[in-house]
Image (cartoon, rainbow, N blue to C red):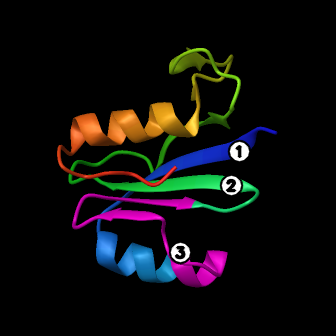
Amino acid sequence: MKRFHIAISVRDIQRSVADYSARLGCEPSLVVPNEYALWRTPQLNFSIRKVDEATGPLRHLGWEDPTAPAFGTSVDVNGIVWEQFTAEQQSAEISQIWPGCKAAT
């Protein structure tokens, strides 16, 4: 089963973690202090990442797909970036960006 993925930009990780934890009814499975947080629910793979520059809140959409052969991206007809990855591939990307941080799969 594919799990829908949403990635958004935020300015305040700590406040956003509190807000989205309340909205989702669970704590994140991973928090990189002041940088990133990831929630995995049965329906959703949701991540937030701190940005300082003026960008839109949507970073990308995608699918956590246990059959994905590799981490991949594509762009739809509206210019929205879509990623496809396994939980393990996402964990490897997180560890590459934030060395020493082990993401739960």
Q: Which residue is mark 1?
A: 4
41 is higher (above) or lower (below) than 1: below
Name the foreground residue: 73 vs 105: 105
Q: Residue at x 37, y 34 (%)?
A: 92
Of callouts 2 and 1, the N-terminal one: 1
In this rendering, would 84 be left or right of 34?
right
Of callouts 2 and 3, the N-terminal one: 3
How far apart are the alpha carbons under marks 2 and 3?
A: 12 Å
Tell me if residue 101 is in the magenta stretch.
no
* Residue type beneath disc 2: Leu
Q: Disc 3 on helix, strand or loop?
A: helix
26 is higher (above) or lower (below) than 85: below
Residue 44, numbered circle: 2
Residue 31, numbered circle: none
The magenta stretch is 21-39
Q: Which residue is mark 3?
A: 20
Q: Disc 1 on helix, strand or loop?
A: strand
Residue 80 visible in the current orientation:
no
